[in-house]
């Protein structure tokens, strides 16, 4: 899967962009504030229906306009899809796939798996478990069609339980709901555990490649005591949950932790090593999808590689090249790209970005 064409209207400072893209590497070169990150953000938006920078969608609409439009042509093997997304300041969203309305964001996301590597993405390692759950769930979403429904239902049931905690008179009233919730919790957790276990060797191998000096290990934590029946845990925790007003343990607390030589990575790794680890994780997961599902995965790499040392940058470029993925890389100058050893190939494209205008070099 790759994006062969991208049209952007009124997304941040990108008022009118229309690009024919390379299926290999696309380099975006431009000064600070020219619109490089905005371009990656627009691609991300097209695949997620939201930004990786701001939760407020009005922020991405050009200051002087009342809506933005994104259009992409997606190609995979011999198939082609056109995807379009429009969002207004009033909050109306129009989403079309091959001209058809009534599509959901999850349909878009299925079509466009992507991994983002940005400096902010370090939260995967030094942020809360939410980021690592999102990492795991990304893989499950693309690996198993049914995961999304289970996950969405679980979220809904948990929300309902939290609301009900304040209303029920005793636990008996909540019990039938908890039994349903527990079934889903086990289902989702088991899927997470199986996926985490399958991904583990891939991660460890990729970490060996990027950080051979460290022994990186990963472990999945389901969010409640191992081997325990979740419905029992819910029953035992009822009074406490009622006091605090929400469900304290469960799959909403799951985590996927990384250790280096037995210690939590965020405590012992340098910033540079953390960045490298983050690259390795995203790469391993993207590659795993490619091999498991014969699907491609897009990589968006922002300002990032510039902070890695040249040999590691070259390793990253080489691995991405081998994966056959479509890659977007931003840099401030061509020199920087040269120093990064991002060796160009004929199919690659370079674009210059200047004050929101993007032209092929
Ligand atoms: N909603 C918006 N409308 C118009 N311009 C915006 C909006 N949001 C941000 N900008 C501007 O867009 C420019 C591009 O930012 P960015 O893509 O982060 O640049 P780069 O990554 O090239 O350094 C910045 O100058 C920023 O001020
Ligand atoms: Mg930027």
Image (cartoon, grey):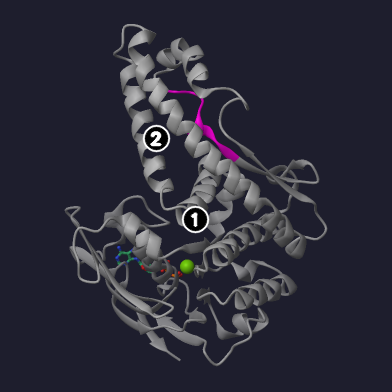
Residue 88, placed above or below residue 234 = below
Q: Quadrant of residue 84?
A: bottom left
| Residue that appears at 62% across and 71% down | 306
Q: Quadrant of residue 98?
A: bottom left
Task: Give yes or no for residue 292 being in the magenta stretch.
Answer: no
| Residue that appears at 36% across and 67% down | 42
Q: Quadrant of the C terminus?
A: bottom left
Mark linked to residue 154:
2
Q: Nearer the viewer, residue 233 or 63?
A: 233
Residue under numbered circle 1? 143
Instruction: Residue 324 in the image: state x and y as whole percent.
Output: 57, 77
| Residue that appears at 47% across and 81% down | 23
Q: Is residue 95 left or right of residue 249?
A: left
Disc 1 within 8 angstroms of ligand 2 (CB): no
Which sits earlier in the primary sequence, circle 1 or circle 2? 1
Magenta residues (range)? 246-255
Q: Which one is in front in this view, the residue at disc 1 or the one at disc 2?
A: 1
Q: Is residue 154 left or right of residue 286?
A: left
Q: Quadrant of the N terminus?
A: bottom left
Instruction: Residue 76 in the image: state x and y as whole percent.
Output: 42, 75
Q: Nearer the viewer, residue 39 or 134?
A: 134
Residue 33, placed above or below residue 187 = below
Decide if residue 49 is in sight here.
Answer: no
């Amino acid at each position: 899967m790759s994006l062969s064409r991208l049209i952007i209207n009124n997304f941040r400072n990108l008022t009118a962009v229309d690009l024919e893209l390379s299926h290999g590497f696309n380099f975006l070169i431009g000064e600070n504030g020219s619109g490089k990150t905005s371009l990656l953000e627009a691609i991300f938006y097209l695949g997620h229906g939201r930004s990786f920078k701001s939760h407020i969608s009005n922020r991405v609409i050009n200051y002087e306009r009342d809506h933005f439009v994104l259009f992409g042509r997606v190609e995979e093997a011999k198939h082609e899809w056109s995807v379009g997304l429009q969002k207004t300041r009033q909050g109306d969203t129009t989403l079309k796939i091959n001209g058809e309305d009534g599509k959901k964001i999850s349909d878009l996301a299925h079509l466009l798996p992507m991994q983002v590597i940005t400096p902010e993405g370090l939260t995967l390692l030094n942020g809360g478990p939410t980021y690592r759950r999102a990492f795991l769930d990304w893989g499950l979403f693309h690996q198993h069609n049914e995961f999304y429904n289970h996950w969405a239902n679980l979220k809904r049931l948990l929300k309902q339980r939290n609301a009900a905690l304040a209303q029920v008179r005793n636990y008996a009233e909540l019990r039938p709901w908890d039994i349903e919730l527990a079934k889903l919790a086990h289902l989702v957790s088991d899927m997470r555990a199986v996926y985490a276990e399958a991904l583990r060797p891939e991660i460890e191998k990729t970490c060996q490649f990027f950080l051979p000096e460290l022994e990186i290990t990963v472990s999945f934590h389901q969010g409640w005591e191992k081997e325990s029946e979740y419905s029992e845990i819910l029953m035992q925790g009822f009074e406490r949950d009622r006091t605090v007003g929400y469900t304290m343990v469960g799959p909403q607390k799951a985590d996927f932790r990384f250790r280096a030589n037995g210690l939590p990575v965020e405590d012992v790794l340098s910033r540079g090593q953390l960045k490298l680890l983050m690259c390795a994780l995203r790469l391993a997961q993207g590659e795993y999808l490619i091999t498991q599902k014969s699907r491609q995965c897009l990589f968006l790499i922002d300002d990032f590689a510039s902070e890695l040392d040249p040999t590691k940058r070259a390793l990253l470029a080489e691995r991405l090249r081998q994966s056959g993925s479509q890659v977007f890389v931003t840099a401030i100058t061509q020199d920087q790209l040269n120093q990064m050893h991002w060796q160009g190939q004929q199919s690659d494209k370079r674009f210059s970005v200047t004050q929101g205008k993007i032209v092929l070099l």
